[in-house]
Image: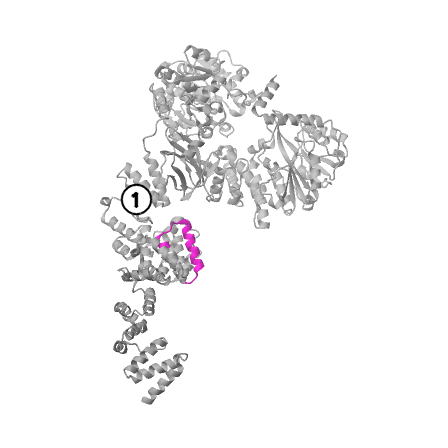
Amino acid sequence: MNKVKRKFRKLLRDPKLFFSDMYFKHSIKIKKHLPVKYEGKHQFTIVSAVYNVEKYLDDFFDSIVKQNLSFKKHIQIILVDDGSKDSSATIIKKWQKKYPNNIHYYYKENGGQASARNLGLKYVQTEWVTFIDPDDFLSLNYFLEVDKKLSEHKNIAMIVCNLLFFMEKKEIITDKHPLKFRFEKDVNCLSIKDLNNNLNLSVATSFFRTSVIQGNQLLFDNRVKPNFEDGKFISDYLFELQHYNALFLKKPVYFYRKREDGTSTLDTSWQKPEKYKNVLEYGFIPMLQKYHNKLSYVPNNIQKTALYDMYWYIQYLLNRPEKIRFLSEKDQAKFYQLYDKVFEYIDVENIMQFNIAGAWFFHKVGMIGAFKNQRPPFQIAYIENIDREKKQILISYFTYFDDCNSFRLNGRDTLPVYQKTVTNTFNEKLFTYEKRSWIPFEKEDDILTISLNGLMMRISVKGTLFSKGISINKILSAFTPQAKYLTDGSWLLMDRETKADDNAEHFYRYMQAHHPEQRCYFVLNKSSIDWQRLKKDKFNLVEFGSIEYERRLEKASKIISSHLEAHINNYFGDNYDFSKKFIFLQHGITKDDLSQWFNTKKNLSGVITATIPEYNSIVEELNKYKIGKKETFLTGFPRHDKLLSGNIKGAKTILIVPTWRHYIMGTQIGKGANTRELNKAFMTTNYAKAWYNLLHSQELKNLIKNLGYKVIFAPHPNIEPYLNEFNIPQYIDVWKSAISRESMQSLFQQSNLLITDYSSIAFEMAFLGKQTIYYQFDKEEFRSGIHTYQQGYFEYEKDGFGPVAETLDALFAHLDKFVKGENDYINIYQSRIQKTFKYRDTNNCQRVYEAIINLDIPDKYIDKNIILNALKSAYKAQDWSLVISRAKTLLAEIPDHSFAKNVLFEAVIASNNKVQMQLDYSLLNQQEKSILQAVKCSQKLAWQDVLNHLKGIILSNEQLLVLSLKANAYLHNAKGTQKTANKLSKIIDKKKQHLFKAWIAFAKQDWVSVIALLENNISGLNKKELELYLPELLLARAYCQLNAFTSSHNCLVAYEKHSFASPLSRIEIAHLAYAKRNYTKCIDQLNKCFAKELDNLPTESLAEYALSLLKGNNIEEFEQLVESPLSKKFEQYPLFKQEYVYFLVNKKAWRKLIEYAQNWALQDKEIFNYPLMLAYYRLGNINYVYHNHIKPMAEHPYEYWKLIAEAATLYEDLELSKHCYKGMISIYPEYDIKRNQQYFLTLLHKQ
């Protein structure tokens, strides 16, 4: 009958698995009677290492000899007995007798699986070999399918077969291997060099070419254990076969037996020291080094082979360092050292692509940060929940670095109402932070965007990614529950399904008495001893698991329970579509670290706490709990309201209440948490022996018989099924939660001493001012990680309410002191008891009620610490726009906050945007006002004004020193630049000194030095350094000046990848465009610098703007600009002067040219002597030309020689005329040579 029930439950739980399993079992029965034996084309040998597997050998042989492929003709079995001490040899020889030509037996002394396999390999003579384990078995088509596919495909070096788990205890088949995706197709043929995610870690499910193994003298390494022995062998085998193929076959199935006794290799490996040394030192690291040394790289498949196991280490040890405390500290350190070494060979790209076995972005961020010290190439923020009543959204993301983030609604920086940083550790060092923030929203059409470190994050909502933000509306829609969860406003309360009398019952009574308007239901098993009692008290009872219960559960708005197990917190498995608020009343003080358990609960809206340390341990930053101040309430427990009033002092009653151990319990069955199979070996456990010895001790008997003490034994509900086996003496009272009509609270009230091991019930006794003795006989075992226990803030020796005894003798010694009433002994613990609880009144229920009601009321308060921390984060990142926004927010709350004022001022100074009225000028001193004016001037590129405002101010801030550096450099004041650089060198990292040296070279216009200093020294700079020192803009100018236009362009493109266009960058773009004669682009960029306010442009840029108008044939605009007052700024600039002079000459604007020359320096008049003399000459002022000309020289143009020759002739200056004609004839023979010669002869004749 039980078997039928079990099968029925399986059908309900997983119909697909039920029918596939049924098909499997019946197909085996049918195939056993099939006489057909196929002949194939290939020969196979099975090498099996045998050690104490007598129980499984018949199944093993049966599945092989009955293969569809003829066993006698195609399959050999070599069994190497590795020193078995059971009947394995007898069974093998029995089968060998039946098949003497196919089954071969060898014996050796015990040396491990590797040595046994290596011995077996010596005797292999077939083409193919495999290594099936003798406790497993095969599908009957296993070898036939392999044979067929080998004949259909060429160049095959390895075949890998499908693996399913056979769960021995339940006799079911499961397809849950993490690598099962390899068999999505019936046949998958892959090149070995491109296996990528198709990992192979099992020689048992694989076939190998014997010739390759023997030709390369491959062996299994006996040092690589308890796992990866196979993986190492396979990687060695594939090393020389990169140009061959591998087959992955779905139809041939290998059944891996998960043993009932838990002794399968997969089950036991984590408890073996070799897992933390040998596997890494002799397995993974040599494998990676071999490939790297030979190929100069590690193939992706080999990297992921290592990464696969590294991931399982993370899964096992993440936040659980106690799991390897069985190792010495030295061995622990060695393990982590080896583990880090493996990651030296694993690329970030392979980590990002690793999606096997449940690895997700959390693991990737952690691995890339913790082991590669890098950031992922992109970031994801997860929308986890919404609070419709409070209009808040829960957003989480993972990061190894404490980078600055920003949540923006329609571009507006929005700070969280609640925030929590969760720390995840590996090796008790940071693995990754989880940042959790409740963001408030108002308008549902607002667009949410999130950035981290200045880069936009992708947003994930229930598996869908949004790369450009998402509307609040879409988020709300995604979290809209199914119609069945439409609430009727009722509350559902529950303690255990088997037992009431806990916080939920006490709170229900409060609601019954004080808030009857709120509809409440209480959930309990009808078979519970408390059902009739509560029914008499007019509780609205609902039977747990009934149809009515499920209906009430669907409609409830709040679920309020003292327990948090999945059958209460997530009964339907869908978190109730986040439609309800679950309030965990707790059933005991949280003294241990329960974060891993708590963190699995997705819909936890409230946790009730009773002590200050307990509350702080949950809400404090950087711990492991995901919940924080939003979800945690320090109210006191409801049951404590009644506990004090019935307290009995001076009673001679000792209460013994041991807690349970997860690892000695039977398997959980049924929907509830408290129904389990019995562990037949329970009484052989240390736990059972220790409590049995106490209960049967003579000392305890004497205490009862001679001193009149009463002893009550109240085991944990999970231990109650074993009570009969304790054979408890009649002089000890037994309290059973399932049947006792006396409440647990009354036990506390009537007792004056508690004996427990680790139970939080000690807090109940402490609440009553009573003492505890902690009997921790299995202290090391309990804390080793095999129980659910994780050390929290509470240390029994330091914080406990009584002494700790690790032996029975020590327990009785402490008990003796207690009985004798030794005051000094008792007072130590009484002082701890008095400091523990926040409240000792009778208002806990009221506070709990108020906390629950407040869950639906929008928050009005602002957490100033969140604002301050956000401001500090922005300041650390030098994100000046966020600093300005957050500083102003904080100053609105705390007007005199000095840090906010200081960083706001600094942010305004450092901001690259135009300074608005960000500061209250009345709060600034004169120096600050001067600095602010200097910043304003720098934004207009008025560099001399910058220096004027900074004059007399002692500059010690990097931002201001760089401002002075730039101002001097742009004015080409090399001396001033050097002086500022000297100051800067004293306060910045030496690694950045090439930056200010580049500015010195810029000031000197030493373009070659600028390039030499910066060309290969930019890649290591962060965004803020790039924005502050502008190395790309300096390089762009240097390259442009040396006509390396492509390099200049690349620098400008690099700048724009991290910064928005600024006036300085636009000026450099315009300068390059001008140099490349792209005058339209030059004009466009300079117009955009200051929104066409050209008066802010530097002289050079203004000259290039004017000349671009001229050369771009925008003559009318050019002339308007030249005629404007703005021309005074650039008209004497050398670049402009030359072009403008010849423009006037070409236009024959002689008077304008003469007028333009009025302000020329003597040097200019010499440079432009010809056009100036020509202007006077054309206006008939020959006298001016004759008396002001410069005697023609070789560098003068022919036209100038000719002009002066004419003037000399008119003034009958024969010497000057002869000079001019001589020059024209000798220097410019190609011009009018005959005419000039004739004139010269005429002059000679006149002489």
Q: Which residue, as the protein is rendered here, is positioned at the far top?
A: 536
Image quadrant containing the C terminus? bottom left
> Would residue 18 be found to the left or right of residue 569 on screen?
right
Q: How many numbered badges does the structure rendering display?
A: 1
Which one is nearer the viewer's eye here, 1043 or 1122? 1122
Position in image of residue 473 (x %, y %): 41, 34
Position in image of residue 634 (x %, y %): 36, 25
- Could you say whether the residue bearing mark 1 is in a helix, strand or loop? helix
Q: Is residue 121 visible?
A: no
Residue 1231 magenta-highlighted: no
Specify start and end residues of the magenta stretch as a single range.
1042-1066
Position in image of residue 278 (x %, y %): 57, 39
Count neighbours of disc 1 (C-alpha within 10 A) and say few if under 14, some if 14 to 19, many if 20 or more.
Answer: many
Which one is nearer the viewer's eye here, 386 or 934? 386
Position in image of residue 723 (x %, y %): 52, 16
Q: Which quarter of the figure has residue 1003? A: bottom left
Q: Which quarter of the figure has residue 684? A: top right
> Would residue 1058 be found to the left or right of residue 32 on screen?
left
Which one is nearer the viewer's eye here, 560 or 798? 560
> Would residue 574 be found to the left or right of residue 67 on screen?
left
- Give the residue type that dot 1 points to: Leu
Which one is nearer the viewer's eye here, 479 or 651? 479
Q: Is residue 238 visible?
A: yes
**Residue 774 vertical position relative to residue 1060 in the rendered view, above or below:** above
**Residue 181 vertical position relative to residue 921 in the rendered view, above or below:** above
Image quadrant containing the N terminus? top right
Residue located beneath label 1 in the image = 904
Magenta portion: prevailing SS class: helix
Residue 1047 magenta-highlighted: yes
How are the residues colored? one colour
